[in-house]
Image: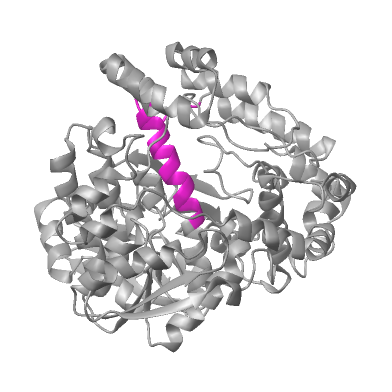
Amino acid sequence: MDGWFFVALPDCEGAGRIARRLPADAHLVARHASGRPLLFARVPDAQRVTVRLGRVRAAVVGVSSATEESVRGALGRAAGVDALDGLAPALAGSFHLLAADGDRLRVQGSASGLRRVFHAVIDGVRVISDRADVLADLGGFPLDDTALALRLLRVLPHPLAEEPMWRGVSAVPPGSALLVYGDGRRARTTVWWRRPEPELGRGAGAERLRAALEAAVDVRTRAGGTVHCDLSGGLDSTPLCWFAARGPADVVATTMYNDDPGGREDLLWARRALPSMPGVRHHVGRLDDMPQFFEGMEDIGQRLDEPSQAYLTAPRIAHSIERAAARGAGMYLNGLGGDHLLHGLPVWDHTLFRRRPLLALRRIRTTKALDDRPFLPVLRELLSSESYGRWLRRTLNEARRVREVGTDLRMEWDQRVSLPRWLSQDAAAALSARLRDRAAHAEPLGPDRARHAELAMVRDGSRIVRGTQQFAATLGMPFEAPFFDDRVVEACFAVRHEDRYTPMEFKPLIKAAMRGSLPDAFLRRSSKMGGSAQAARGLRDHWPVILDIVERSPLTSRGIIDFSAFASGESPQHMGTRDASIDATVNCAVFARNHLAGHTHHNSEEASHGLAAS
């Protein structure tokens, strides 16, 4: 079991058997009132708060503003596990909550999806964890090959990405809690999170966002010590660095650059912001000194609990963490999530058109010009009233094996699904059946396309960050993304879409939030640099290694992909624009390889059973 995790157990006789299977360094941190084990955790001591009050036991696991006094106060204001309803929205940070009152056990993660909850019945005991692979190890559950084939898709519309990778393990949807009764024989999920209505204008919204970001950074810096901040010079990481510099911690900030066209822009903008952050120790590094994308993936042995883009970036993350640790940092802050919250989507205008049609049309005209799309397809999307369930079933039925060469800006519910061209026939058939089953009862994440799309985008981003956090934990470093804290997400969601983002200005909400704090010369930034050129070079330089990883992986040996189609259909010399399905395939190959290392006797019958399971 790699990295940090926790395991919660119901109040039953069999709990002790499960406890004895846990690693010795998974410490018992809470017991039920009966004396039976309740919570085991392998996390830093600073990331857990436990409280006892009468028969009630409660715990907060993660980085949060919780104190024993605040948790005890919440327990005193409500009966038993229901106290979590009032505690959750009162806390800043990113965390899990747990409470047991003798009759019920309740466990919940975050609404953003960054903190997940899974459960499984193991030897008659319902076991709960924040990681699906921990439950799979404890229960000896097999990898679900159809779930693995699903993760080969570049686009995973809701709810396709929420199911675990192992048969026998169940997931709790983000924003819901698992409620276990008595000895664990009966359990259900219950929704605890309600998103705010988008009612605030930009001024009030900026104040709320500023307060949420300040609190989010404070919970990560208030203990002092040394904190590392990415300082890309962008409108995401720079505000976080500014808030960190105001706290009691020493702040080390790093800006990276290279000699690509525009590769020095981040350094230019970072230096414009630095005068407002006296005391920050600023370091400058060359991106060329970091591992390339795709470099070193053959040596990444850490196990994550789902395929993740974190694998592709793991060598670069390790490089950054090692340098931060060498400078004394015990916490690493990054700006991941800012793009997901502060940069709008064209589909927002589909919803805005129903309320303010003239404004929506002006925005669409600007967006269409930027994207250079014909007007009639845009108009058809604008006038469409297709439900989410019908749209999902249609896009899945229309999914074809095509090469992804880019992403159009659309006003549909989500991006369209396409199948990688190297998916095997058996895997494609099993996957199609699974997709039809999941789409049959799919409900949107919001009452309209805008609110569905914004939450889907947050959860998509949180899956990536969750993987990076799991990887960083194996190196002993908290890798924190405050923008994905629930309070920060709520602050952005509370702002009207037209005030949160406009195609005529780059990230106006965060600019308004930081005006008067960060220099005006910095707040004029109107773009950000991407890493596509670096990724293309990495793919070109490490293509032979990629082929070897995929060929030797369980994707090939278990018949999930046709390796010859993968190898012959792509090469850096002719592919032009990189097919994003390559990234998903390599990440899945490394994930499956790491989890099945040493398990070499999976015969074809077993693999076929995995593909057939739904």
- Of 186 and 598, nearer the camera is 598
- Of 502 and 117, nearer the camera is 502
Q: Quadrant of the N terminus?
A: bottom right
For residue 155, side relative to residue 525 (left or right): right
Q: In this view, does 410 lie above or below 520?
A: above
Q: Is residue 183 above or below residue 430?
A: below
Q: Which residue is drawn at 73% across and 28% down?
A: 400
- Magenta stretch, main secondary structure class: helix
Q: Residue at x 32, y 45 (%)?
A: 507
Q: Quadrant of the C terminus?
A: top right
Identify the image quadrant of residue 230.
Answer: bottom left
- Of 125 and 509, nearer the camera is 509
For residue 244, side relative to residue 235 (left or right): left
Q: Where is residue 211 in the image (x, y as percent from the top left)?
A: 16, 55
Q: In this view, does 238 lie above or below 114?
A: below
Q: Position of residue 122 (x, y in %)?
A: 56, 57
Q: Which residue is drawn at 46% across and 27% down?
A: 369
Residue 216 highlighted magenta (yes or no): no
Identify the image quadrant of residue 240.
Answer: bottom left
Q: Position of residue 143 (x, y in %)?
A: 69, 53
Residue 461 highlighted magenta (yes or no): yes
For residue 612, side relative to residue 156 (left or right): right
Report whether residue 186 is seen.
no
- Of 447 and 368, nearer the camera is 368
Which stretch appears magenta?
A: 442-464
